[in-house]
Image (cartoon, grey):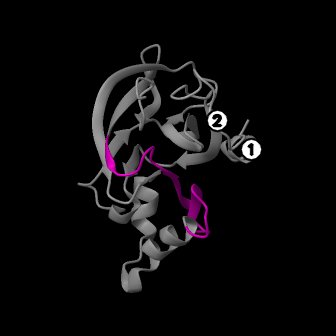
Amino acid sequence: MTLDDFLAKAPRRQPKRGETGVPSPWLDFCDLKLSDAKAHVVDPSYAPIESEGCLVKLKRGTYAIQCQVMAFGADLRIAGLRMVLPGSKPERGDLICQTGTDTGKIAVYDYDAVSQVWRDEDNASLNILKEAMQGGRKNGVAVLDDKSGAVACMVRSGFGDGTFDVHELKDGNVRAGFEVTFISPDTK
């Protein structure tokens, strides 16, 4: 099931006892092609500043961006985000770094691809990111350059602003991706 399908079908009622704080299965959001070895996990307003957020080294390839959702009151919140190689059997590993947001959003993208096409004049690239999150859309994919395929996948981060742990995902001895926790299952 996709994230959009889950959010569209999910009832907007008060959760029953035992449903609050229970994560959904991992839901497909989008695919992200990593042409170089670095994924950037960052508040979109700080893209593509290398010293902001978290740069995660991964193998080149096409990764699945997936999210988990939790119910709190009548709200559904993005509780976690992960970038994972399809077909892998990921297990959560060590803490890599932390990332944070002041805007209640987190972007994930191929750092080198986005850096190469980023346009500062008139905030052109930043405006593309902002447009992808407007109009009531809580999650979106911003196309920064059609020709190169540079995109940023963006989601709302749990309860909004904060700092979040980024853990590696391992398949055996191979780093198969990473996971960001916005809301812990222990949150009540």
Residue 27, labelled with which disc?
A: 2
Residue 59, labelled with which disc?
A: none
Badge 2 vs badge 1, beta-carbon distance below 8 Å: yes
Residue 84 percent across, percent down from the top left:
53, 32
Q: Is residue 116 left or right of residue 152?
A: left
Residue 65 percent across, percent down from the top left:
57, 41
Q: Is residue 144 left or right of residue 37?
A: right
Q: Is residue 64 left or right of residue 120?
A: right
Q: Nearer the viewer, residue 117 or 14?
A: 14
Q: Quadrant of residue 86?
A: top right
Residue 164 visible? The answer is yes
Q: Quadrant of residue 169?
A: top left
The tally of labels here is: 2
Q: Which residues are magenta?
A: 134-163
The residue under label 2 is which amino acid type?
Leu
Could you tell me which secondary element the residue under label 2 belongs to?
A: strand
Q: Is residue 107 above or below residue 166?
A: below
Disc 2/disc 1 C-alpha distance (Å): 9 Å
The residue under label 1 is which amino acid type?
Asp
Q: Is residue 25 magenta?
A: no
Looking at the image, is mark 2 or mark 1 earlier in the sequence? 1
Q: Is residue 29 above or below residue 85?
A: below
Residue behind mark 1: 5
Residue beneath the point at 38% across and 84% down: 121
Crowding at mark 1 (Cα within 10 Å: few <14, some 14-19, many 20+):
few
In the rendered image, which quarter contains the C terminus?
A: top left
